[in-house]
Structure formats: structure tokens, C-alpha cells
Image: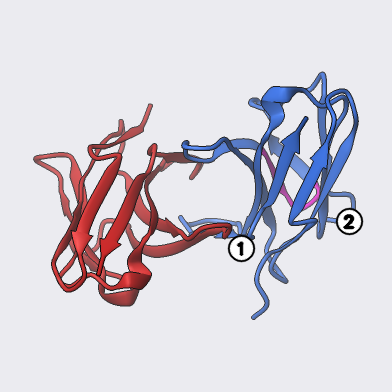
Amino acid sequence: AQSVTQLDSHVSVSEGTPVLLRCNYSSSYSPSLFWYVQHPNKGLQLLLKYTSAATLVKGINGFEAEFKKSETSFHLTKPSAHMSDAAEYFCVVSRSNDYKLSFGAGTTVTVRA
Amino acid sequence: EAGVAQSPRYKIIEKRQSVAFWCNPISGHATLYWYQQILGQGPKLLIQFQNNGVVDDSQLPKDRFSAERLKGVDSTLKIQPAKLEDSAVYLCASSPGGQGNQPQHFGDGTRLSIL
């Protein structure tokens, strides 16, 4: 079985400062991992994905995530937050046998001017 | 390419009434998913179609929920009768399907409120 734990339910940052969203996973197999973002009243948009290639994954809008097998983590970072980054972020793990997704509970990001 | 289309965007009904949602996936995507997202939680898979066949409906409350994808393209999800706990956003997603771990593309969802 696989599962995802997002360690922070809410993160508040100032515009221009770094953002760190923490995610730990558990998986019986080599996982595929994703980060999705959801803006208010919108669907989920894929930020980036890890599928056993490079451990440092670059995504859209300046986001990147590092896969650390020894720590079973897949934390999401961005060097400089923008007001438009205010949204809900989901860490997601995919089963390698049937590709079904398991979602974390989400982290709400607030960006202060 | 056009994204996943869903309608309506919002729906308000009273408990015990029925409601239907519609989804048109990205053209050529063989796999279609319906998710339920309760406020403050991540999406939960209700049903997965591969073309017009059901792959997984283990989490679908079959006493009140039904879904179909008759021609392997668009899909409808129905709730009859609705309960208060069905208040949620219903998200449709699609992926190309086949082999490989391809990301799912989501629509904007239908927000359902039960009075």
C-alpha cells in the first residue's frame, strides 16, 4: 500500500521569500510522485513529477522537488514566492502496478505582501 | 489542446433530489476518472474508466451513485437520492491511458451543495 503525509496543513510566507512544502511517502514499490496545485474554484494542475529519473525535478512556475529515497521524502521548494502562488498544494503518490493516485491532505499556502 | 470540460460548475439541490454531472475529457484520452473532493481534503477516486469499460469502482457508493461512459468519450456521474454528506466538489480527470505512468489532467470541477 502507498500513502502520503503532508507535514504542514498551512504555510505562510512573505512575497519574495523561499517556500518549502514537506511531503513524506510510503510505498511498497518504487513510487512515482507528483505535486499538483489547486487555485480557488479550479481543478488540479500538475506542477511536476518524479518517475525514477533524476532525483531533482524541475517543474513549472519556478518550483522544484527533490526525491530522497533514504528519507522517503519529496519536498517542494521555490526560491522566491509570488502572490500568484497562493493556493492549495497536493503531494501525490502513484502505485507502480496500476498507477492509481493517493493524495495527501493538502497544504494551503498564503503569501503576504 | 482543449482541457477537460465539466458542467455545470455549481449545483444546489435539496437532499433526496437527484443530480447529474457531465465530463468531456481531452480528445484521445482513453482513461477517465471521477473524484470526490470534500472541503479540506484531497480528492478521492470514485470510478475509473478505460475507454467505455469500468476499471475500478470500488469506492463508488453504488446504492446512490452511478456513472457511465457509453461511447468511450464523455461521461456522466449521477447521484440519486442525494444526501447531505455528498456536498463536495466532483472532479473529472483524464489521461492518455495505456502503459506508463502518465499524469492526469483535471477539469475545474462541479461544486455540489446539498440543502
Inspect the image, locate mark 2, and give the three-letter code of the amino acid beneath it. Lys
Instruction: Tell me the residue at 9%/40% (across/down).
Output: A70
For label 1, the crowd category at 10 Å Cα-Cα, with few meaning under 14, some 14 to 19 and many 20 or more, is many
Q: Position of residue A80 (x, y in %)?
A: 17, 73
- Seen as rendered, the residue at the extreme bottom is B1
Q: Which chain identifier belongs to the red chain? A: A
Find the magenta span and give its range.
B47-52
Q: Nearer the viewer, residue B8 or A47?
A: B8
Q: Nearer the viewer, residue B21 or A33?
A: B21
Q: Position of residue A105 (x, y in %)?
A: 39, 37
Mark 1 element type: loop
Q: Which of the 4 quarters of the picture holds residue A56? A: bottom left
Task: Read off the residue under disc 2.
Answer: B71
Q: Position of residue A73 (x, y in %)?
A: 18, 44
Q: Is residue A76 visible?
A: no
Instruction: Tell me the residue at 71%/69% (across/down).
Output: B28
Task: Read off the residue under disc 1.
Answer: B96
Left or right of B74? Residue B30 is left
Determine the colour of chain B: blue
Give the alpha-carbon distance from disc 2 to disc 1, as whole Å: 16 Å
* Between discs 2 and 1, the one toward the N terminus: 2
Inspect the image, locate mark 1, and give the three-letter code of the amino acid beneath it. Pro
Q: Are marks 2 and 1 in contact (CB under 8 Å)?
A: no
For label 2, the crowd category at 10 Å Cα-Cα, with few meaning under 14, some 14 to 19 and many 20 or more, is few
Q: Main secondary structure of the magenta part?
A: strand
Instruction: Tell me the residue at 37%/71% (across/down).
Output: A84
Letter of the chain that mark 1 sits on in the rendering: B
Q: Quadrant of the C terminus of chain A?
A: bottom left
